[in-house]
Image: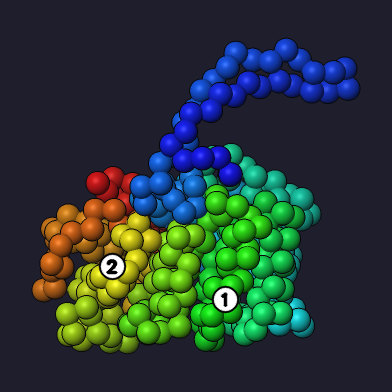
């Protein structure tokens, strides 16, 4: 809730049963400017790595949240659960992860945040279906998501709904949630490729509707098949051209470069199709940010502010020796 590009003075004291200590010497800090690099979602790096963390065991490496690799700047806890009331979400920690208590999980969230990471709750996934199709369900979504943010300390939400959305009502829900959570809320999305082929699709409309509070759209460049690029040509998944030519649609369709990320599987087992070697992700980022290492498609201009990359999942990455995060993470963080 602090003003952007403004200096504030802070003093610190300690309090216990005996009273309050003397205040420390003053420290001055200046909030970040609203330059499109750090906002919305104050505190997210200009170039960021997003990883989905699995709240279930499907054969990937089971991780406690504190074990998530340090390269990840945004950790999307996957997934929230729907309730019998349309639009309402809740969260149930899977016993398979070995936590001794919910409090231990909450402590892990706090520890990651203390290390400068953002931890958000993801809504949807392959099997998750949350329906927001009227004013009442929009209100339930906003209220329940805010309750989870307060209870667990989540920094925001990720919209990963793969069973259709209504942009009108989900816009209302996200704006209501933003009003409750404040300007530091992190809002990410992970649409499928078909959802972002045109600004007329519901997902693309949603992204543009909430552009002023949207942190990043990490489209899933997998489980897709061939798609049109921004030049009208057809590109097959699994190539640098597929990543760059489809990202170009979002970049030229109204999203800020800081709101565009490339989502790829962390290993061949992380998705049914569309895996690319992490070096291909880096080449695509260089093509978009610098105009170098492009394939046959080369965008008409560069987008040095592109946010970064995402993977499904931190667990598959761990099982694969952290190759994805160790390769893509340093490259993302070194972008111009």
Q: Residue at horizontal 59%, vertical 60%?
A: 178
Identify which residue, 106 or 29, lies in the foreground.
29
Percent across and percent down for residue 231 are 17, 80
Identify which residue, 156 or 96, lies in the foreground.
156
Identify which residue, 147 or 285, lies in the foreground.
147
Indicate whether 194 appears above or below 91.
below
Q: Quadrant of the N terminus?
A: top right
| Disc marking residue 61 | none
Q: Residue at horizontal 36%, vertical 52%?
A: 36
Question: Which label's residue is closer to the chain start, 1 or 2?
Answer: 1
Q: Quadrant of residue 226?
A: bottom left
**Mark 1 lies on residue:** 170
Element class at badge 1: helix
Element class at badge 2: helix
Percent across and percent down for residue 76 are 54, 61
Q: CA distance from mark 1 to mark 2?
A: 22 Å
Percent across and percent down for residue 323 are 37, 57
Indicate whether 10 appears above or below 36.
above
Q: What colouring method underlies this structural image?
A: rainbow
| Disc marking residue 251 | 2
Q: Quadrant of residue 112?
A: top right
Along the horizontal axis of the image, is 185 left or right of 6? right
**Residue 56 in sight from this viewpoint:** no
């Amino acid at each position: 809730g602090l003003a952007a590009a403004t200096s504030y003075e802070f003093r610190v004291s300690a309090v216990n049963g005996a009273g309050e200590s003397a205040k420390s010497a003053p420290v001055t800090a200046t909030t970040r400017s609203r330059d499109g690099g750090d906002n919305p979602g104050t505190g997210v790096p200009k170039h960021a790595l997003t990883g989905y963390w699995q709240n279930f065991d499907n054969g990937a490496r089971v991780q406690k949240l504190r074990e998530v690799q340090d390269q990840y700047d945004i950790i999307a806890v996957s997934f929230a659960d729907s309730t019998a009331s349309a639009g309402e979400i809740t969260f149930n920690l899977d016993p398979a992860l070995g936590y001794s208590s919910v409090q231990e999980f909450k402590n892990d969230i706090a520890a990651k945040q203390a290390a400068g990471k953002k931890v958000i709750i993801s809504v949807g996934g392959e099997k998750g279906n949350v329906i927001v199709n009227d004013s009442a369900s929009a209100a339930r979504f906003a209220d329940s998501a805010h309750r989870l943010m307060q209870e667990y300390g989540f920094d925001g939400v990720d919209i990963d709904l793969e069973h259709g959305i209504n942009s009108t009502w989900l816009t209302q829900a996200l704006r209501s949630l933003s009003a409750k959570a404040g300007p530091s809320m992190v809002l990410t999305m992970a649409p499928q490729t078909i959802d972002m082929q045109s600004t007329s699709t519901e997902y693309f409309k949603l992204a543009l509707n909430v552009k002023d509070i949207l942190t990043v759209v990490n489209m899933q460049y997998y489980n897709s098949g061939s798609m049109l690029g921004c030049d009208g040509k057809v590109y097959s998944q699994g190539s640098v051209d597929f990543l760059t030519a489809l990202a170009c649609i979002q970049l030229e369709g109204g999203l800020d470069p800081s709101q565009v990320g490339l989502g790829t599987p962390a290993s061949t087992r992380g998705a049914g199709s569309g895996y690319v070697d992490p070096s291909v992700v880096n080449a695509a980022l260089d093509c978009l940010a610098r105009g170098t290492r492009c394939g046959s498609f080369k965008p008409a201009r560069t987008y040095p502010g592109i946010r970064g990359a995402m993977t499904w999942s931190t667990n598959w990455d761990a099982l694969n020796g952290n190759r994805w995060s160790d390769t893509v993470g340093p490259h993302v963080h070194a972008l111009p």
